[in-house]
Amino acid sequence: MRIAALIPAYNEELTIGTIILLCREYVDEVIVVDDGSTDRTAKVAEAAGARVIRHEKNRGKGAALKTGFKATDADVIVTLDGDGQHNPNEIPKLVRPIIDGMADIVNGSRYLSGSDKNTPFYRRVGQKILDKATNILTRLDITDTQSGFRAFSKDTIPYFNFKEDGFAIESEMLSDAAESNLRIVEVEIGVTYDVEGSTKHPLSHGASVLYRIIRDMELKRPLYYFTLPGVIIVVTGAILTLIFLRDYLLGKSIHMGPTILAIMLTLFGTFFMFTGIILDSMKKMIEHFQK
């Protein structure tokens, strides 16, 4: 099997050369998608022996992966970051389940054996939130949903929509894989944090990914997007109603503001609940007729 390494890169001249040289020990081809870098990333990558595809403007990691996947016909494609966080020496571990016919996609996980002690606390808290949201969206049980170190069989590429241009592509690809019933296996990997040249800001990265996951739930998981918030709103309205009844029975002065708020919350919550139930039923009917 021909194996290719695909590296999306943005302003990573300090690390990209080393990553490419290490990758070349395990793959037949290294493809670097230079996503509008303003430094010498492309020149260093070419000097290290990679095939470089350039975006004139920075379009995001998702767009870079889309370009890279289209540029190769390798049997297995390994994706990894160019900032030095991932160890190319672990590539054989990632591609083995695909070569053995045990998986369509292999996800490199930092947390397969539990929490990684090297992971900064603030990163792990955010990671857990994104893992939970992505697993709700996909109905998978992935321990590291935001991993950029993955291996793909070439047969899986047509199943990906590549709608996301940014970092939310990691969750989107898992969602597409789940919808297509692709076999996903996780293997344990290591990771290096706070490497020089890293372009990700944890807070903005996490917030943007979470926003897009929640947005996708609107159609894919309407019970979580509509019905669950609706239940919370109805319960809040019911509590306010009980408080109003208690005050009324005790002869206390009644304020109309909380009463009107209780009625509105109950109505809106009920509307949200039934909206989620109806959309979920429609989704299941569509899926049934598509089979």
Image (cartoon, helix red, strand yellow):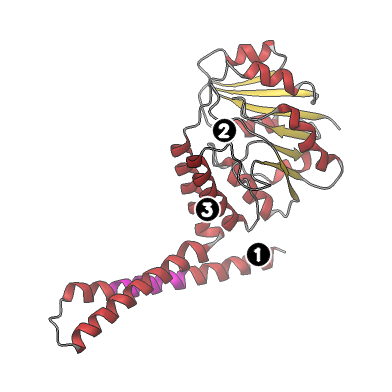
Instruction: Using the image as rendered, state which of residue 65 and residue 262 is in the foreground.
Output: 262
Whole-angstrom CA distance, mark 3 to mark 1, is 17 Å
Q: Which residue corresponds to the image point at 62% horizontal and 40% vertical from the top-left?
A: 147
Relative horizontal placement of residue 24, taking residue 210 as reference (left or right): right
Q: Amino acid at mark 2?
A: Lys
Q: Amino acid at mark 3?
A: Asp
Whole-angstrom CA distance, mark 1 to mark 2, is 31 Å
Q: Which residue corresponds to the image point at 85% horizontal and 45% vertical from the top-left?
A: 101
Picture coordinates of residue 261, whole percent (x, y): 25, 71
* Secondary structure of residue under mark 1: helix
Reading the chain from its start, which is encountered first: label 2 or label 3?
A: 2
| Residue denoted by label 3 | 216
Q: Quadrant of residue 229?
A: bottom left
Reading the chain from its start, which is encountered first: label 1 or label 2?
A: 2
In which quadrant will I find the N terminus?
top right
Span of residues in magenta: 264-275
Relative horizontal placement of residue 218, taking residue 82 as reference (left or right): left
Relative horizontal placement of residue 144, taking residue 244 as reference (left or right): right
Contact between labelled residues 1 and 3, with CB atoms less than 8 Å apart: no
The 10 Å Cα crowd at callout 1, few under 14, some 14 to 19, many 20 or more, is few
Reading the chain from its start, which is encountered first: label 3 or label 1?
A: 3
Q: Which residue corresponds to the image point at 74% horizontal and 44% vertical from the top-left?
A: 105
Picture coordinates of residue 14, whole percent (x, y): 58, 16
